[in-house]
Amino acid sequence: MQISSVNDVKIYNLSHGKSLPEWLSDRKKRALQNNDVDIQRRIELIQDFEMPTVCTSIKVSRDGQFILAAGTYKPRIRCYDTYQLSLKFERCLDSDVVAFDILSDDYSKLVFLHCNRYVEFHSQHGHYYKTRIPKFGRDFAYHYPSCDLYFVGASSEIFRLNLEQGRFLNSLQTDAVEHNVCDINPVHQLFASGTAEGKVECWDPRVRSRVGMLDCALSSVTEGTEQGLPSVSALKFNGSLTMAVGTSTGQVLLYDLRSSRPLLVKDHYYGLPIKSVNFQDHLDLVLTADSKIIKIWNKDTGKVFSSIEPQTNINDALGPAPRWCSFLDNLTEELEESPESTVYDDYKFVTRKDLENLGLSHLVGSALLRAYMHGFFMDIRLYHKVKTMANPFAYEEYRKDKIRQKIEESRAQRVQIKKLPKVNKELALKLMEEGDDEAELSARKKKGKALPSILSDERFQVMFENPDYQVEEQSEEFRLLNPIVSKVGQKRRKKLRLLAKQATDAENEEEEPEGRGSSDESSDDDKSWVDEVREQRRLIYEEGRDRRRQERKKQGQQPRFFQIKAGEEFRSFGDVARKQKLQKASLEERLKLEERSGTVNVADTAVGSKQLTFTLKKVSHDDTIT
């Protein structure tokens, strides 16, 4: 039993808590009842007062002795005797029940409206008769003076079935497209039907004509109401002049039949359809329920008296407590302390993966494991014993985790250390500094916001995770394209070493050293970027010269050999001497030397084979040119 208090009104949840497992033996159940406080505090008003899956509707007979509940699965009806506090009978049905009513003072005459358009009549011994209506029904009401059943549903007509004559009568033709609920006033027998358009049509059964219409849709629309046309989802008369209308948007409207305007509008603020409306005349209270909450409020002022919000969905509400519940006052005073233990304290729920980790997969199918949902129940003592054997150092690991959590909580109060990625640390630090400067500048100007950093952009995330994207600062291209990167890199490397030292000190739980100020860093800015480029070129040249020198040394240690092909002479030294001699000789001597050696060749061309020969000779002064 659970006890709660809303507006100083105590609410007792008699069915709170976990149910006993069905596979427990009777001996184990008796042992739990003797040892478990929660089971001892459990109050079972009526034996088997439950449904296998869900209960759709519930009603109390007019004499107050019997409670009838319809539910599923399978579709069934159960009758409980409140004098004996036990289940009287249970009947299974062919289809789900949409609505049902008790026509007699006891359970001897019952009417069921099924989801397949069938209307089924039951007497005291069981099924009596079954007929079918033309359209799918949603609700019905019984008119006692004329013995007429009025059925409303997915049609503009209201069907009438006379139980005295045993035949259908002329239907009532309405202006609505569909009807959701209906009710008959117990005083003057006025029939009212709630439509899907948010209207209530009132009919006089004596003349079979409409005598009035209320437009509830516009009256239920408030500032917090969602857009859409509210339809009537609940309808209930109280006395001769009061009528309560529940809408699909979660409002309850109280009407006086003499006025077209509501006296009071009560909103549940959940936006869920109102499923049930009941009145408590002794305290002038109204009980309204949607699928989430039951609200109890004053009929005149609308002030909330109390509310009930169970863990499961609500389908129907009985209303005020009947006379057979009067003995609860004495029981609840004795059991007002809240329970401290649970039903399943002796069992541990484990999944198949947990069994594999513990090495207990071979126990599946044995009596030590009880299958339940997607796992198994096992004895808690066996679980702790196996857990200790599987991991004997579990307590030490748990203790270390707790210590680590406390250390991290204490670190959160200190100065936060910037965490750098493993790849491109210097680039990440540069971006952090630029981001801080930009944020400071935007805050100083008080205009706009700083642009998002590359570090927080998912598109560039791989650049700081994949080692293939590591920037090689020692490459020739990088050093020439970034003339001042060397000095800036020195400053950044100092800061990286400082951050690494701070992180190491934080891990060792030592005092964090004070970082060096910007005044300690050398800022050799006297050189221009041209000098820096020259210096980088000189360094690159020296590095290349040293590299070539080392290669020559390696080649000197390992001489290179060449193979002379057959028919060739080794004349490398003679060729060198000959080339030097030809460079000192005149053009004529070189041509003659090439003719002797046969190196001058004449090749045929496309225009023919021609050759010009020039001969130099001395000419005397006496010769004349003709």
Image: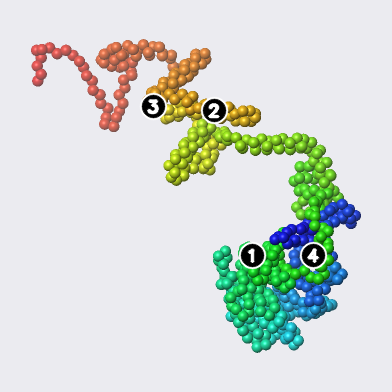
- The residues tagged by marks 4 and 2 sit, at their Cα atoms, a distance apart of 72 Å
Between discs 2 and 1, the one toward the N terminus: 1
Label 3, residues with CA under 10 Å away: few <14, some 14-19, many ≥20: few
Residue at x 76% of width, y 66% of height: 73
Check disc 1 and report the residue beneath it. Answer: 268
Counting residues from the start of the chain, the first of labels 4 and 3 encountered is 4
**Residue 89, horizontal then vertical, whole percent:** 84, 71
Mark 4: few/some/many CA within 10 Å (<14, 14-19, 20+): some
Q: Position of residue 460 (x, y in %)?
A: 51, 40
**Labels 3 and 2: the sequence-earlier one:** 2
Specify the quadrant that holds the C terminus: top left
Q: Which residue lies furthest to the right in this view?
A: 27
The amino acid type, in three-letter code, at marker 1 is His
Please name whichever residue, 248 or 388, is drawn nearer the observer in this view of the structure: 248
Q: In front: mark 1 or mark 3?
A: 1
* CB atoms of marks 4 and 3 within 8 Å: no
Q: Is residue 577 left or right of residue 341?
A: left
Disc ID at residue 529: 3
Mark 4 or 2: the one toward you: 2
| Alpha carbon separation for disc pair 1 and 3 | 75 Å
